[in-house]
Amino acid sequence: MESAEDLIFTLDGDGVIRSANQYMAGVFRAGDGALVGQSLYRYLPREQADEQLRLIHEVVELGKRQRTESLFQIQGRISGSICITFRSASRTAKNL
C-alpha cells in the first residue's frame, strides 16, 4: 500500500479519513499521518465529496461494490481522471 502510486485510503461513513498511504499525503501536500482524522470535505470540493459519500453509504447499506470514474480536483485544480472502487469492509468503506 505504501509503495503504490495511487491514492489509497479508508473513510468512515461520515467522510473522515481513517488511513491514507504516503502517496496520497504527498498529493495533498500533507505530512505523514496528517490526513488521518480529517474530513474529506477539507480536500475535495463539496459536490465531489458529497458524491463520494453517497457511494460509500450505498456500499455500506446495500453491501455491494460501486465503481465510478470522474475528474478529480485537488486544491482547486483538475488533476485528471480517477477511477474509484468502493467495497464494504466491516461497516467502513474502502477507497481503492
Image (spheres, grey):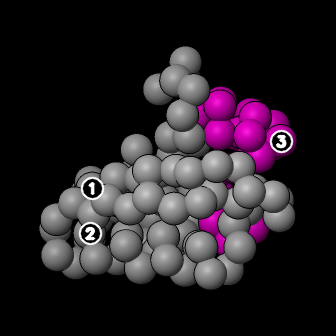
Q: Which residue is drawn at 27% across and 63% down?
A: 66
- Name which residue type carries label 1: Arg
Kindly check if marks 1 and 2 are in contact, taking CB atoms under 8 A apart as contact.
yes
Locate residue 5 relative to residue 95 in the image: left or right.
right
Between the residue at mark 3 and the residue at mark 2, the CA separation in whole angstroms equals 29 Å
Residue 69 image position (x, y, % from top left): 44, 58
Q: For this rendering, which residue is in front, 9 or 91?
A: 9
- Name which residue type carries label 3: Arg
Residue 7 can be seen in this image: yes
For label 3, the SS is loop
* On screen, residue 93 above or below 31: below
- Name which residue type carries label 2: Val
The residue pinned by badge 2 equals: 59
Residue 80 image position (x, y, % from top left): 64, 49
Q: Residue at x 54, y 69 (%)?
A: 15
* Residue 22 falls within the magenta-colored stretch: yes
Kindly check if marks 3 and 1 are in contact, taking CB atoms under 8 A apart as contact.
no
Locate residue 78 relative to residue 65 in the image: left or right.
right
Q: Which of marks 1 and 2 is nearer the N terminus?
A: 2
The residue pinned by badge 1 equals: 87
Q: Which residue is drawn at 71% across and 49% down?
A: 79
Q: Give the range drawn in magenta.
A: 21-42
In the rendered image, the quadrant that contains the C terminus is top left
Residue 42 image position (x, y, % from top left): 75, 67
* On screen, residue 50 above or below 11: below
